[in-house]
Image: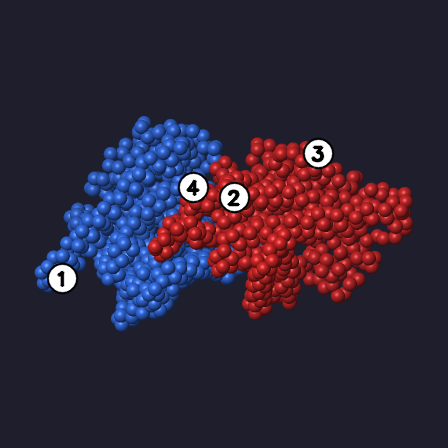
Chain colours: A blue, B red
Amino acid sequence: MKVTLSALDTYETSFTPLVVIELAQDVKEETKEWLKNRIIAKKKDGGAQLLFRPLLNKHEKETLGSDNLYLVGASRVRLLLGAEALGLVKESVDGTMRTFTYSTRGSFRGFHDDNDDFLTMTECQFIVKHELENLRARDEKMIPGYPQAKLYPGKSLLRRLLTSGIVVQVFPLHDREALKKLEDSWYTRFSLHCQPIDRIRGYFGETVALYFGFLEYFTFALIPMAVIGLPYYLFVWEDYDKYVVFASFNLLWSTVILEVWKRSCADMTYRWGTLLMKRQFEEPRPGFHGVLGVNPVTGREEPLYPSYKRQLRIYLVSLPFVCLCLCLSLHIMMIYFDLEDWALRVHEESSTEWTGVLLYVPSVIYAIVIEIMNRLYRYAAEFLTAWENHRLESAYQNHLVLKVLVFNFLNCFASLFYIAFVLKDMKLLGQSLATLLITSQIINQIAESLLPYWLQKKHSVKVKRKVQALKVDIDATFYEQVVLEKEMSTYLGTFDDYLELFLQFGYVSLFSCVYPLAAAFAVLNNFTEVNSDALKMCRVFKRPFSEPSASIGVWQLAFETMSVIAVVTNCALIGMSPQVNAVFPDSKTELVLIVVVVEHVLLALKFILAFAIPDKPRHIQMKLARLEFESLEALKQQFQMCKKW
Amino acid sequence: MKVTLSALDTYETSFTPLVVIELAQDVKEETKEWLKNRIIAKKKDGGAQLLFRPLLNKHEKETLGSDNLYLVGASRVRLLLGAEALGLVKESVDGTMRTFTYSTRGSFRGFHDDNDDFLTMTECQFIVKHELENLRARDEKMIPGYPQAKLYPGKSLLRRLLTSGIVVQVFPLHDREALKKLEDSWYTRFSLHCQPIDRIRGYFGETVALYFGFLEYFTFALIPMAVIGLPYYLFVWEDYDKYVVFASFNLLWSTVILEVWKRSCADMTYRWGTLLMKRQFEEPRPGFHGVLGVNPVTGREEPLYPSYKRQLRIYLVSLPFVCLCLCLSLHIMMIYFDLEDWALRVHEESSTEWTGVLLYVPSVIYAIVIEIMNRLYRYAAEFLTAWENHRLESAYQNHLVLKVLVFNFLNCFASLFYIAFVLKDMKLLGQSLATLLITSQIINQIAESLLPYWLQKKHSVKVKRKVQALKVDIDATFYEQVVLEKEMSTYLGTFDDYLELFLQFGYVSLFSCVYPLAAAFAVLNNFTEVNSDALKMCRVFKRPFSEPSASIGVWQLAFETMSVIAVVTNCALIGMSPQVNAVFPDSKTELVLIVVVVEHVLLALKFILAFAIPDKPRHIQMKLARLEFESLEALKQQFQMCKKW
């Protein structure tokens, strides 16, 4: 290996800013100097060996007055070595995916020694972020200038700087040109084509691309349900056998689409290299705190928090709180039914046009209240889960997802279950379902994308005016870009987007045989959702750091659970329908038994289907087997070579 | 590393025979010479570098006349290097489990350079077997002397020798002394203690030890069910609520024991090192045949068999055959019910003592017929699955297990389901269940262990007489041992043993609320089963080659599926019981609905329980996390070192 880290000593020739670090306004010079030295110090001296410079040079600083923004970049060789350290997987010239190593760099597709495109900007930013986070304390006991910001050997400096407020934020820069191109191929031109998933992945990383991939896949998968559902609504087909056919189709279809998604997901993530990427060892999450002790796994000194204390917090505080929220939600549901009753009475007493509209008012109000409660509960759940003090980000996420899913499920669907199985009013059920589905979709699109976009636009005009007012002799466009992006809100991950899809899937599948139009509405919504979400990603939020991921994770399980619940509810609904009851006028018991048997058969079929459809397509399986075989052969070779020494 | 394979050149000083190779009687001298040379040739010349010698020396050969038995051994260093090649996992001096490497041998517990006990005899035999199987053809086109036994580069010689009948069998030798010790601590002395699982594992390997571990665990786990069931039988408690309590307890208990088993299994296999052992690349199974082609995974030339042909065989032949067998089984079941009717009529017409006994005769005959059909079907299933020509042993096993489980399940339980849900005769159900359970247990114990043991004993006396009659001047005991073991039948794996337990679990759990005594009978049977199975392993069969395994594999899934079916049947039985029906005299529908709701709640609880109980105990999780952390750290170190060069 010829080029090594020592070759990085020559200072940068061309500096491409990748990541911005914003310090607090009043950070001491001493701290700034120390941070800079740690970032540019060589790897062997415990530094990150990155490039670092202020956004403004001395002259500009005097004019503009603020100097709390810093740019981080890295030389090309440094980035390639970082890619190796991260275990990035790239396509080699023979078409297979292989873990990148610097020494074998020549064997990867698209690599030339004078080519800067081998790593995408997103990957470079991810590498820089990883290197910054892995900049660890050595013998420092505290951050210079801030005695209260304690350090211990091995503590990530960036995390401590963030928790003690010295660093306000770290974010990657947008690439204006690439973003424009991406937008053009994505959503600005209305035409019938699939999303450019690979380009989205290139710009935003795998997690975001997988969300958009899933959204698109899910939308197309709903089309058959929507198409088959339409005539049921239009021609008011209400025969027993037609409904059974529709519901059975829906249930098996929803199983099949979830299984097939796993396969196309494996296809995509293999192409992106994340399917093969080894999991990194998980560090404690930023907010985790505890008493210093020796971690039995790593042998390092780090904060420890006894598991029983966490369990106590979960079972004595979080669990009762969640139950209380569930009760509150049910209470509000009962108020809604009172309102509904009242509206009906008013309408019956004096039937005018106005009272006809009034009939829909309670549902709409309830739908809005549900959305508000979901959002409030979300904050509470985040606060509680953070307070539970989980050590790992994955544990935190799991507890948060569980809390939020249980509540949102009940909050959104309790009224529908109540109407279906207690009131047994199928007409009200269809009407309620439609109102809830449509209202929540409209609220979501407005609250998620359009409103923030409008606010963002207003703000951006303000900033532009401010910068232009300065009329200084500097490269204003770049300065303007950084200042603008600094003020944008941060994208908090795909959680809310998946949650929305999850609830939509619930509306579509749980009561599909009562309101066959639900799928059609969902399809319509999702076509606009793609565009509003794309707008949100490109224009409203800061560019997020890419996160490699090989699947949609816990959401796959959530969707599968929902489709199991859907089998149960649909069977029950069909069993309760008057048409079916008319077929068995004498023996209700026989009817119930038949419905139960059908339900069990469907459930068994579902599990067998899920088991029989392989999770990975055959060609991916072959490629994975080939890689495994090669690595075993390589090990054997190595072993033989060692013996020969 | 000082000692290498070249140090093995010095011929053996002490030869410990590990494995016996039996050739056919008429093998040509040329072939014998070639085989010998390939086995003792050095690794770098493509040999196995093992020790190899005939059982009889020249002088003895002339006296006894036969020379088709050969002994294989290996030098100590060879075995240690073989252990490294296999990736055996051993306990190191600091108490953690680590993959053994020859260069770090000093860091493992119990290793001294003059100590032969570090590898158990079982491990040595496993290593020898692995080395023999990996002895591959290089440029030979055929086996010398046998032009019809074709070879191609990379083909395992031993497998070709076995399939062309030149090698009759390869088997490991018993260690008389160790076996005696094992027997003493295992089953010969009747006392109340657990089985010496670790010693069983040391002698027979992990797969067999896991079976005995599971058998013991399962027996103890059944004790609470047996104890709680006894008073129900003794005091004829037939109240509705008591039955519900009993059945609910059984259902949740069976979920819990299966989950807890996973944990104790992880505990054991961690201690044995197999939990951490990397999977070896799976070679084609011995019986696999096809047209020579290039395997897309390995790039090697080997026989290929198109997947569509296999699918055709499965769907056009195997599937119809299985269905036919199922129909036949149902037909025989109907004959049994006719017989049962006839016996009842005879008894009613002329009730004497004899006709009272006659009532039990049909059940007993049917139980015997079921056992016979199970065994016949087993042969057919093995033949068919072999004919389907699966490339991998694991695929073969999965298809065999699926075929056998489906048939055995129906064959054993169809009559019980028929009695329960069609005839609705709970008294007959209990009686039938008892007869089936007890008869099958008796037949199994006799057919599996006692009869073969008796035959083996007779045969061994004959061989002993023969050897003594020779009165030759040789070490007769060792010769006698080899000749005796050569004639013993081969242990075909744990399949039948697990199958027996699986069916027993079915009898106990499916109808537990009708016949609470089932668990007690199962416990009684299993206490003797431990002993008869142990006798079988030690005295009746050839010593098996050990097989490393980390869990009971597909059987865990089979038992879990059975426990799901048990929830459904038990709920249905309780719903049908006259006591419960008496509580809801007016509304059968309400009763059915309540039962269905309870069933769904139990099933949901079951899945939540299975999800909530972690599969590995916390201390094993910690140890695994520690190992993962260390290997990641080692990789990082290696990476840093490479950079420094």
Tag 3: amino acid? Asn
Label 2, on which residue?
B233
Q: Position of residue B306 (x, y in %)?
A: 58, 67
Q: Residue B435: horizontal and vertical position, in percent?
A: 59, 52
Which type of secondary structure does the marked residue at label 2 adopt?
helix
C-alpha separation, residue under disc 1 versus residue under disc 4: 58 Å
Q: Position of residue B98 (x, y in %)?
A: 58, 39
User: Does B15 appear above or below B165?
Assistant: above
Q: Disc 1 marks which residue?
A: A356
Give the residue number, with chain letter if any, for mark 4. A282
Quadrant of the rendered image containing residue A302: top left
Q: Position of residue B250 (x, y in %)?
A: 48, 45
* Label 3 sits on residue: B115
Determine which of the numbered discs, if any, sits on residue B555 in the image. none
Task: Please name the amino acid that badge 2 sits on.
Answer: Tyr
Q: Tag 4: Cα neighbours inside 10 Å, few (<14), some, or many (≥20)?
A: few
Residue drawn at the location 36% of the way across and 52% of the way down? B584
- Same chain for mark 1 and mark 2? The answer is no
Q: Residues within 10 Å of mark 3 (few under 14, many from 20)?
A: few
